Image: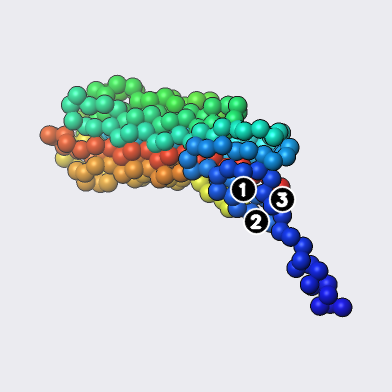
Amino acid sequence: MIGNIIAALNSIPAPSPKATGGTITTNGVYFFHTFTSSGTFAPLQSLTADCLVVAGGAGGSGGGGGGGGLLTFTSQSLTVQNYTVTVGAGGTAGSNVDPAPNGGNGNDSQFGSLTLVKGGGGGSNQIGGGTAGSQGSGGGAGYDSAAGTATAGQGNNGGGATTSDIRGCGGGGGAGAAGANGTTAGGGNGGNGLASSLSGTSVTYAGGGGGGNFGTTFVGGAGGTGGGATCPSSNTNGNNGTANLGGGGSGACATNPRTTVGGAGGSGIVIVRYAV
């Protein structure tokens, strides 16, 4: 009898996904569709789904790049149609070679017609690079410039910079906290990101990049949790933000002549979850 029951249970087919698109996994309770690049989500029936949307992080220059914007949408009613999924790329690294550009802003992510989630703001150059980018999270300030500001509800502001000859640049803002200010001791830390369990496990996304430093000593800022890159404490290029976490690239440490570049931002991600 028990053997017959076990055989009957084993013959029950496993549930099939109710949509196509992305990389599909299940934990037996939910199906997860993970998009690490742009694509299409297509329900095969009407669904109620939760969505995590993380935009691309920004590139650093002197200041750290801001983490990508992050939003979670719950209990979305989806019908049988195609939903365009856009996964934002990370922003380009900025250079410290005059005339030097700021780090590039991260690119936006979106699921269907839901609110556009903004990429991170690029970090400012170390010497007169102008205002850092204002996007999902703001970029960190370089010397003699202003920090970037965040989009309300999507991230936090970048950190400020010193105005002395020992130039500590600001850390990029993260989804969970603002970037720290640079000091005469070195670059500011990137702001921490936010944790989400929508993928089935807790993952932290959209940390800000650490700020760089200009002077005779090199102390770079730490990257924020969630893929924000740490600035090397040496006269070297910055590090890249983590791909598919939306982390900001770090600034670079430099002395004269300035030949270093910051790190690029990490790409974003979109995850759609619904019940089995």
Query: 10 Å neighbourhood of mark 2: few (<14), some, or many (≥20)?
Result: few
Other residues around mark 1 within 10 Å, as few (<14) / some (14–19) / many (≥20) = many
Under tag 3, what secondary structure? loop
Residue 142 in sight here = no
Q: Which residue is mark 3?
A: 276
- Dots 1 and 2: beta carbons under 8 Å? yes
Lateral position of residue 114 relative to residue 178, left or right: right
Q: Mark 2 or mark 3, which has the lower sequence index?
A: 2
First along the sequence among labels 1 and 2? 2
Viewport quadrant of the N terminus: bottom right
Q: What's the residue at 79%, 73% (across, down)?
A: 6
Q: Give x and y (percent) for residue 165.
A: 19, 30
Q: Which mark is residue 93?
A: none
Tell me how many marks there are: 3
- Give the residue at x 56% y 37%: 40
Residue of label 1: 32
